[in-house]
């Protein structure tokens, strides 16, 4: 079933309008959003499952409400809602930050404080290339998922020199953690045969 069919089936009975396009205009974001911490919710509009984030929308005419996912909040007539866009961005960034902090906490505990990057991350919101390579290596040796590791910092000259000095194997480890813009900038140091996904 297509998105429009699922959305119509779920939205029209709760709306005054009889078409999806008109019904969507009756709904607005309430400002309430929730991060469940893991993918466990269902979008009440499109019925997608395993959602981590919920955003509440309410019909201005009928006063009915629904909880929708982070994609639907942008798709069906409220994409121009600045508050919803800010909340969605803040919710997702906050969740990623908490996950990165959790991994760094775990690394600090696993290494008895010998590899503690929590203060550095709190100040810079990212790790240097050498810090990331070390963190990836420890995670893989200790069976810790690397998925939530923070971003790589490559703006400063020192960070760029570190990137250039990495071995081919270290670049191979680091490459999946670079943003799309970083990959474009550093395409010349991309090791052969490495993809863009996380290959634990």
Image (spheres, rainbow, N blue to C red):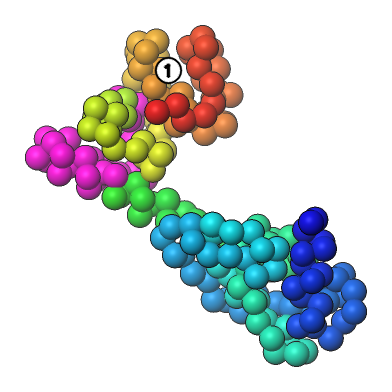
Q: Is residue 44 left or right of residue 24?
A: left
Q: Pick the quarter of the image with the N terminus.
A: bottom right
Q: Nearer the viewer, residue 129 or 173?
A: 173
Q: Nearer the viewer, residue 133 or 155?
A: 133
Residue 8: image quadrant is bottom right
Q: Residue at x 37, y 13 (%)?
A: 169
Residue 162 lies in the magenta-colored region = no
| 97 sits left or right of 68 in the view | left
Position of residue 118 relative to residue 53, above or below, is above
Residue 86 visible in the picture? no
Residue 119 is a magenta residue:
yes
Q: Could you tell me residue 83's position as x and y percent?
A: 61, 69
Specify the principal SS of the magenta part.
helix
Q: Position of residue 114 (x, y in %)?
A: 11, 35
Residue plotted at (54% across, 21% down): 195
Q: Quadrant of the C terminus?
A: top left
Q: Is residue 66 above or below residue 156?
A: below
How crowded is the residue under tag 1: few (<14 C-alpha within 10 Å), some, or many (20+)? some
At horizontal 29% and vertical 29% (from top left) the residue drawn is: 140
Residue on which the image places disc 1: 172
Q: How many marks?
A: 1
Q: Position of residue 183 (x, y in %)?
A: 54, 25
x and y, in percent, of residue 172 in the image: 42, 17
The one of 111 and 143 positioned closer to us in this rendering: 143
Q: Quadrant of residue 138?
A: top left
Residue 153 placement, left or right of 189: left
Name which residue lies at 58% across and 65% down.
42
In the rendered structure, which segment of residues is drawn in magenta? 103-132
Q: Is residue 82 left or right of residue 26?
A: left
């Amino acid at each position: 079933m297509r998105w429009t069919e699922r959305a119509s089936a779920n939205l029209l009975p709760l709306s005054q309008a009889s078409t999806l396009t008109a019904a969507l205009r009756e709904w607005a974001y309430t400002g309430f959003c929730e991060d469940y911490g893991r993918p466990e919710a269902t979008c009440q509009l499109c019925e997608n499952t395993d959602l981590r984030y919920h955003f509440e929308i309410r019909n201005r005419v009928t006063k009915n409400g629904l909880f929708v996912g982070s994609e639907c909040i942008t798709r069906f007539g409220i994409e121009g809602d600045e508050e919803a866009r800010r909340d969605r961005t803040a919710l997702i960034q906050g969740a990623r930050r908490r996950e990165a902090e959790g991994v760094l906490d775990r690394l600090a505990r696993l290494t008895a404080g010998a590899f503690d990057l929590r203060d550095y991350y709190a100040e810079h919101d990212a790790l240097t290339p050498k810090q990331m390579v070390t963190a990836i290596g420890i995670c893989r040796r200790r069976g810790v998922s690397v998925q939530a590791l923070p971003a790589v910092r490559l703006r400063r000259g020192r960070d760029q020199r570190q990137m250039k000095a990495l071995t081919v194997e270290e670049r191979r480890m680091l490459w999946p953690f670079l943003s799309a813009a970083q990959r474009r900038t550093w395409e010349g140091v991309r090791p052969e045969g490495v993809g863009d996904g996380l290959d634990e």
